[in-house]
Amino acid sequence: MLVGLERRPSAPLPATSAMPTGVAATGVNKCNPGVLYGWAGCLSHLAPLDGRGAAAAATDSLPISGAAEGPPGVNGGGGIILATSATAPAGGVPVQPVPTTATSTPTPTPRPLLSDRKSFFSQFHPKPLLISIIRLTTLTASTIFATYVTDQIEYETSNEKLVTSGVLTPDQCDLRNKEWEDIQWRIRWGEFKTKAMVGWFKYQVTVLIMRTYEKLAEGRVTTETLDRLTMDTMKAGIRACDSYGVGAGSSGGSSGGSGGSSSSGAKEAVRSEMVSTCLWANVIGFAADATVQLAILSYGYYVYYQGRRARIGTDLEVETLLGEDEEVVEEEAEEEEVEGVEVTVQGEVMDDKDAA
């Protein structure tokens, strides 16, 4: 227990005296911060010490270290309050510690399951629709330009090889390059509108197939599994960094010792968690994209096969017609030969008659 001792003048303090109203703030401000009791605990020790004047006089001549000056307004002021023992002196009243309120870190609310799942036609809302148009338009334009530059470099390289071998002159090479640039630039950017529309249509179809697969999986897997399959990876990464204290605002990454090792462990935990999260969250998207690509390949093969059959049928008809024409020509030739033979025979007969 903490013991309060007071050095004061000889005037006694009544046992029932109360703390003056205007002294409370002054007394508290001048108390030692290590002494954890208030005015009630301080005043409760004053009355028992009044009856021990000899002890109080004895303490007047002793050096007191670690003591704090008591309230000046109590018992004439100039008192000394000393905390020296864990037990109260004889006749003293044990000091009751002032209860303190401990600050606790609030527990984060768990995320509701399926909170990242989107509605079936959410991609047609104004904001996602605008983002998809801008994204696919930019992607198509960059692809066309990159392909054009790559093909231009290859074409100019082949022309330079011809110049080196003496097949072309430098002027002819420049002319060929200029003609290629003018023609290919118009052709490729002329396909931009069609390619952008086809890309946007493929994207929308892929998203609709994703939503269909999510709907089919809803009644076949658990809620926890469906939450993993429909999780937003960006939001999941932000939540993981916040939960592990990893991010731009954390200070443990640059400190050494245990702080640095704990920060490295937190980053490794975030990395491991996000790898698993991304794998789960992209299963349905991968299946939807594979479905669209297989459908496109199947349709392309069907068109190719039908065109090939049409070409084969046309070739057979041409061959048949050619064969018929050849037969007709042969028959006509045979008829002409027969007619020639008959004419020859008749001529010989006439000659024989004339000779006779």
Image (spheres, helix red, strand yellow):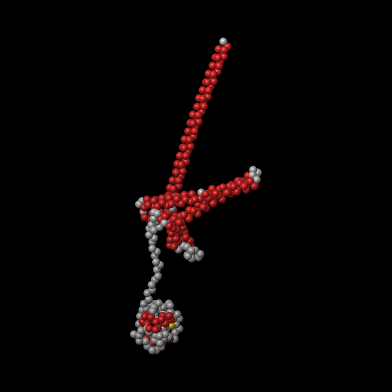
Give the quadrant of the C terminus.
top right
Specify whether 87 is left or right of 196.
left
Q: Is residue 88 visible?
A: no
> Is 252 placed above or below 26 here?
above
Residue at horizontal 52 percent and vertical 20 percent from the top: 339
Residue at horizontal 41 percent and vertical 81 percent from the top: 25
Q: Position of residue 324 (x, y in %)?
A: 49, 29
Q: Is residue 132 visible?
A: yes
Splitting the image into 4 quarters, where does residue 241 fall?
Answer: bottom left
Residue at horizontal 36 percent and vertical 80 percent from the top: 40
> Is 107 placed above or below 11 here?
above
Q: Residue furthest bottom?
A: 11
> Is 244 placed above or below 149 here?
below
Q: Residue furthest front?
A: 354
Q: 61 or 321: nearer the eye?
A: 321
Q: 61 or 329: nearer the eye?
A: 329
> Is 91 placed above or below 275 here?
below
Residue at horizontal 57 percent and vertical 14 percent from the top: 351
